[in-house]
Each structure stands twice: as C-alpha cells, then as structure tokens.
Image (tube, rainbow, N blue to C red):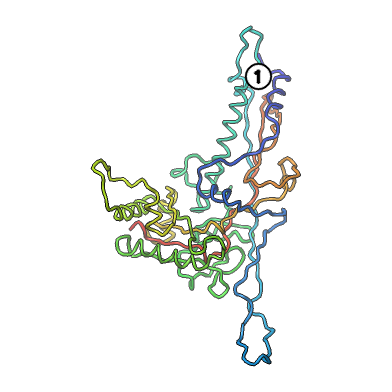
Amino acid sequence: MGMVDAVFGQITNALGPASVQILTQQLLIRDILKRRNMVLHSGSSPFEEAHLPSAGITAQPIYSGTESISMTSTNGLVKTRVTPHMFAANVTLSERELLSVQETTASGGGDVFVGSASNLIKMKTDAAVQGLVEDLVNWFLVGANVATDHPFRAGTTATYADILTLNGAYSGGSLTGNTNGLLDFAAPASQTDRVKDLVKSVSNHHYNQFKQATDWDTDGMASIRQIRARCSTHNRSPVAPGSFPDVGITDPLSYSNILDSAKGNVRVADANDNGEVTNEGLISTDIGGLKVHYSTMLGSTALDAATSASGLIYLLNTNYLQWITVLKGDAVPGVSSSPDPILKMFSVGEPVDGRATGSRYIVIPITGFGNLNLSQLPAHGVVTNTAA
C-alpha cells in the first residue's frame, strides 16, 4: 500500500519546525558554547572587529604641574574583517525509506504512522549535523577534509574553503579575511601574510607565538611552556589572568610524548598499576593547567610538510575563540524566521513534501552560516616538531 497523502502529511506535521541543539564531545565547539562565545552578526558582510595595535597614547611625567600634555595619538584604531561563510545541505528521505519503517496495527487496519519514521528522520538528521560539526572542527585544525582521517564527512574541501583554519600554510580561501590560515609556522618577525584582512606584523600587534622544538627529548616540553608563557602575557581577560591559553590540541604521537612526560611525575606506583596514566590532572599539572586534547587529523603528513617538522601542538586561549553567527533566522535563506536571536551553529528548517519523477520524499534543509574566529592573535601559539 502506498503512502497516502494523509499519512505523509502526518509524518511531516509530527516533525514540525526543528532547531539543532549541538550536544557534542567535539572539544572546540563545546568550549565555544560553554563560554557563550557567540558573536552576533547583523548579516552584512564582512564581519568587522576593532583592533588596537597599542594603547594609543604617550604618557609623560608631571613635575611642576605646568607641563603641556601631548595631544598626539599613536597607532590609531584599525579593524580586522572576516566574511561569514554559508553552506547548506538537504536530508532527503524517500517514500520507500519511510514506508519501510512503518508498522501495521494489531487489528490489521493498514499502515499507520506510529513513530518509527520520526525516529528514522531524527537519526539521519542528527548524523548529518554531527558530520557537519566534525567537518568544521577538522577544517579549523588542518584546513583539509581528509577521508582517510575523517570518514564521517558531510562535505568536501570546496564546502569549507572559506571557513577560517588554524593552519597558517593554507591560502585557498576566496572571501575577505579568509584567504590565509590564522597561525603561521614562523617567528613573529617573519609573519607577513594578510590574515583577517590585516597584514601580520609585530608592530601592529597582529601575529601569533611560535617555536620549533629541536626534538621532544631535548626541549619539547620546555618549548610548550615557553610559548604558553608568551601567549599568557597577551591575555587581557580579567578572568584568571595568567592561566591562559587553556587548551592544547596536538597529534597522537605528540600526545603520547606528553603522557610519558606526565608519567615521570608519578612518585608512587601501585603493584597493580598497568603503567597508564588516566588522571588528566597529571597532564594539567605538568603544563601548568593546560588541558591537552589530540586529533588524528593533526597527524597527517600534509600538515607535517606545511610545518617542515614532525608533529605540533596548538595553544589556544578560549577567551578569544568564537563562532560568528547571524542575529535573526530570517537573515539566512532557508531558515525559519524567529523573533529570538539564534545562538546556534546550525539551523534545521521545516520538513517539506517533494516530488521528483513520480517519487515522493521529505526534504529537511540544514543551513550553516558563520565562521570560526580567533581574536587577539598574540594570545595563541604553535609549537612544532613535538613528535620528533
């Protein structure tokens, strides 16, 4: 028995307008949402952010009280610009798929909608959103969407080409402020790329910290501590000054080196100890409170080639890690209008009834509009060669 209009409409109406709540273990997205680091954007392009290269004044001592105070300002306000990126996808469920999970009433009254189709739609929609979340995080880390390292993909390289990435060797973006990656693998004095539509340089306070370790045994941990200290001096947040950057993201081999270093601080061993350090505090203690995560995407040979080294660790200050999004749903095509600000990374539109070549289906549009962003670049850094 085919799906009659009433049943099809019942499935559609049962879903209603939906919005995605990002409940994910992806560390960067979780940190952004936990800190509510959502930058509301009016929908115009690009997003502009004030940038102060210096204090803007020159102070002078007062001895007699009759001195003339200089009215000259130095290094005035400049702006960084980042264009929000938009991508969209459709979750499509055919009539055959929905019929395959229908159940028959005990009385033999025929096919009825009893919730199984709703579960199928939710499962496919959740999988699509999770794929987008993983894509965003992996792109932000590497500037690539590699199938061998990330089989649960929802898009291609072209989909995310204008999402900002930490990979400073990336130069494939096309929108204002999105051309180059954020964190360069070079000393601050040698950083000259245009990043977020502002040329990097030490003089305009637009650069990131960097150090290449000789190898792990020689100065790997010392290099991480050194760069973290440099980053920390540029943390302007009144919350726990000196305790940032707070997140480290590294490749699996470098992560293993950090664990081995943490084991060296264990002074009492239990007879039943299997040799593994499971207390995350050991890592935090050893790097002064830095919480370290790892990603297999960072272990790619492509990234090693970009850094001219083996392995790396990003040191990020989550006070300055943001997601730029839109103020209202009606500012983005395909998203249901809402009077409330949308503080979400994705929106799921209302399911619609579609037909193509005699086949019926339900289409659920998913829209993403925004961009990941790091502000206050000197508060972030990179250490390379940590897997050597």
Above or below: residue 153 compared with residue 362: below
Quarter of image, res 367: top right
Q: Relative to the observer, which residue lies in front, 126 or 364?
A: 126
User: Splitting the image into 4 quarters, where does residue 176 fall?
Assistant: bottom right
Q: Which residue is drawn at 60% across and 63% down?
A: 196
Q: How crowded is mark 1: few (under 14 residues within 10 Å), some or many (20 or more)?
A: many
Write the residue at 67% across / 59% down: 47
Which of 316/284 is in front? 284
Whether 280 is drawn above or below 110: the answer is: below
Please indicate whether residue 19 sits to the left or right of residue 245 in the image: right
Q: Where is residue 261 shown, x and y percent of the image?
A: 32, 56
Q: Give me the residue at 50% from left, 69% from top.
A: 191
Q: Quadrant of the N terminus?
A: top right
Q: Residue at x 73, y 19 (%)?
A: 6
Find numbered disc 1 in the image and state the secondary structure of the residue it sits on. loop
Q: Work out which residue is located at the far front of the displayed protein and give it.
A: 64
Q: For this rendering, which residue is in front, 362 or 35?
A: 35
> On the rendered structure, is 329 left or right of 289?
right
Q: In this view, does 169 lie above or below 95?
A: below
Q: Is residue 221 rendered to the left or right of residue 348? A: left
**Where residue 265 appears, x then y in whole percent?**
31, 55
Image coordinates of residue 260 in percent, x first then y, are: 31, 53
Residue beneath disc 1? 113
Is 363 left, or right, of 141 in this rendering? right
x and y, in percent, of residue 78 in the image: 65, 70
Q: Could you tell me the amino acid type at mark 1? A: Phe
Relative height, residue 327 to residue 94 (above, below): below
